[in-house]
Structures are given as C-alpha cells and as structure tokens.
Image (cartoon, rainbow, N blue to C red):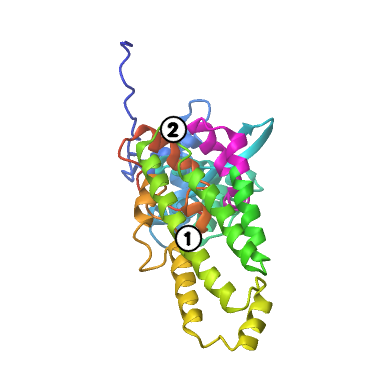
Amino acid sequence: MSRRGTAEEKTAKSDPIYRNRLVNMLVNRILKHGKKSLAYQILYRAMKKIQQKTETNPLSVLHQAIRGVTPDIAVKARRVGGSTHQVPIEIGSTQGKALAIRWLLGASRKRPGRNMVFKLSSELVDAAKGSGDAIRKKEETHRMAEANRAFAHFQYIECTEMAITEFLLFVLTATLGGMFLCGANDLITIFVAPECFSLCSYLLSGYTKKDVRSNEATTKYLLMGGASSSILVHGFSWLYGSSGGEIELQEIVNGLINTQMYNSPGISIALIFITVGIGFKLSPAPSHQWTPDVYEGVRFVRKIPTSLSISEMLGFFKTPWTCRREMLSPLGPRHNFYLFK
C-alpha cells in the first residue's frame, strides 16, 4: 500500500485590494518571470481604466467578462483507430474559469499596441459586452464540440473497454434499419426495419455485460419489445386479411375500398393492435411504464435535453463525461450539466 498522502485541493487566495479570488487568479496568469508586483500593478491600472470607461464597478465587469467567456464544454484530441479526433469533454467550473482567463489574456496580448493595461481593459470591457476575440474563441470551441459530437462515443468505448467493432456494427445496423423504415411502402418492410433497429437497441442497452442493472434492463426491454412486436404483427395480419391479401400500402387502401371492408370491425381491431404495438415501441403515455427501468439500467444521464435523439436516450452514444463517473460510482451517474443545445 502506498504511504503517500492525498493531494489537497489548492484554493486561490484573495488579492489585497478587492479581496477577490478571481482577481488573484488573473494576477497569477499575468505574472511573468516572478514579477508579481508588476502583475498587480497592471491589473489594478486596468481596473481603474475600466471604471473610467464604464462608470461602474470594475469588479462586476470582470465577473461578467469571465462568466461570458467561460466555456461549458471543451474538446480534447483522442487517438482512436489510427486517427486523431477532437472529442468533446466535460470541464468543471474551476477549469472553465482557468480557460476563460487564458483566453482573455491571450486575446489581450494579441491586440495592437504596447500598453498591456489598455489592451487588458479593452478586452475585459468587450468580453463583458459579448464581443472580442475571447468570446469568438469560446464560440469556436462550442462549434467544434457540436461538429464533433459524433466522436463522443469513442471515449465511452475506451473507458468501458468495449469491442469497438461490435459497437459500430450495432450502430450501423440500427441506422440502416431506420433508413429502410423511412422508405418503407409495404407491411413487411414496415415490420422488419423497426425490428432491425430494435434488436440493436436491445444489444446496446445490455452492452456492459458486467453490470447487473444493464442485464435487467436488457431483459425487460427485450420482453416488452417482443410483446409489442407480436401485437404489431397481429394488427398487420388483420389488415392483410381485410384487404384481400395485399401488403403494399396503396394496394391495401384499394383493396379495402373494393371489398368495402373499411368500416368493418376488423379494421378497428387492426388499428387498435397497430396503435398499441407502436405505442409500446415509442413509449408515449400511457405505454411508458417499462421505460424508466430501461432508462435506469443503461445508466444514461438523468437529465436529458430535448435536443437529444431517441437513439441517444436508449444508450447508443452515452456521453463521455458520464462514463467514468458511472464506472467509479456504484450509485450511477450524477446529474448532467448541459449538452449541446
């Protein structure tokens, strides 16, 4: 057993004038060659110039600038399968403030002129107003993270030690099933395409085989999916028989009109069975009783934004910022912070 103690978390001290930790963090970043007194002098002069420009409290302007530049997410280079991908990762509040300070100082130094006091004060004022190079750097980072959101599953595969070939095969098969469903024009394709999508969903929801909850979720998902498929195909059989043995949608309509079966009880029974079967697959109320168990079993984030797709809700692309916490915590993931609105 290692005898080394755990590292204590260091907190920034307050500066002598404003008694604020954020000011001291900014001073430590301005600091060069050990000249801390010069860094304090630059920042305090910049704060006075901000007060002259805006006629407001410079500390509030500084807080507003840092808050505006602080990113919600960041991207990190990950080498997967012989190529490097910019994978979106979660960052905490402390790391976000450090990035914001770094971007603000970098944008200040790139401004024309030799007076660092004037450049820093101008950049802070622009950032507080929502403009400037630091704000553009944040927006560029968010755009890159949004563009590379598809690569988020690589880090999940890496931290859960999954077989990437099988994972991508399931995702590709499910995608093909959805594509065929979009162009379906007959009952066979309408039934086979969702089943192709559903079977991959069953396998992906139970992909973490060592997790008991994942196995339970897969079992419940499979049973409910099989029951809904049976109900759906039973409704299709009523529709097939009532239309005179037709499987294409247009021919079914023509067959119902020719045989005058469109007002028969068989059509009502077929519509009821089809609605129930599709309802249990899509899980709208009141057919959603099985969803929370599967939702808990795949250990996805508990707060799902409306921008996420159904495939992400079912665990196709578990976000990389939850997987490590899930593996370390027996109680499951913590609350999600935000994800690509």
CA separation in Å, label 1 and label 2: 77 Å
Report if residue 166 is visible in the image. yes
Indicate the position of residue 162 as horizontal and vertical percent values. Answer: 53, 32
Of badges 1 and 2, the one in the foreground is 1
Which SS type dominates the magenta stretch?
helix
Q: Secondary structure at mark 1?
A: helix
Q: Of the residues under marks 1 and 2, which one precedes in the sequence?
A: 2
Left of 43 or right of it: where is 252?
right
Q: Which residue is mark 1?
A: 230
Amino acid carrying label 1: it is Ser
Q: Residue at x 35, y 44 (%)?
A: 334
- Quarter holding residue 211: top left
- Decide: is 284 above or below 31: below
Left of 57 or right of it: where is 130?
right
Q: Residue at x 61, y 41 (%)?
A: 168
Q: Which residue is mark 2?
A: 37
